[in-house]
Image: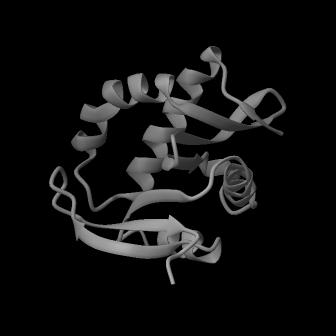
Amino acid sequence: MIRLAERQDLDRIMEIWLEGNLQAHDFVDPDYWIGCFQEVREAIAQADVWVWDENDRVEAFAGMVEHYLAGLFVSGAQRGKGIGGLLLEHIKEQRFPLTLHVYSRNAGAVQFYERHGFGTVSEYIDPETGQPEREMIFPPRS
């Protein structure tokens, strides 16, 4: 079930966030994610966050700041089951248009967003990690 996050969800959301970043971004030094943890925790507490709750346990979340999708993460045990797509479609009903940033080397995420109708607007180097990143938008520009 999709619902808005509650304060008591934050610890679980952060577990999913850290696990997801460490697994999906093995090309970024793990210390980067660990170093960002507190800053991201504070940002998530201020964002609009929708969660996928299954049996009273958060298994995925999507964080929004205005029309910017700041992150969409699914717990490792639940990946590949369509939960991320359901969350994204829910977000698309709430906010329009949408923008996001994704590392170009995270091919699975790039393909996921393309399947859900996002198009690449620009590519650049993330100054914090030195990794190529894309800005994507929904709906794509013609």
Query: What's the image's color scheme?
Result: one colour
| Residue 142 position in % (x across, y down) | 51, 84
Q: Is residue 79 left or right of residue 125?
A: right
Tell me residue 44's x, y (percent).
47, 29
Name the side, left or right, on which 77 lies relative to 67. right
122 over 84 or under it: above or below: below
In the rendered view, tell whether residue 97 sits above or below residue 66. below
Quadrant housing the N terminus = top right
- The residue nearer to you, when weighing 95 against 134, is 95
User: Residue 122 at x, y = what percent?
Assistant: 32, 73
Q: Residue at x 54, y 40 (%)?
A: 63
Looking at the image, the residue that sits furthest to the top is: 8
In depth, the one of 119 and 84 nearer the eye is 119
Left or right of 108? Residue 54 is right
Q: Residue at x 23, y 69 (%)?
A: 124
Compared to residue 127, the image places residue 105 above or below, namely below
The residue depicted at 55 percent of the width and 49 percent of the height is 72
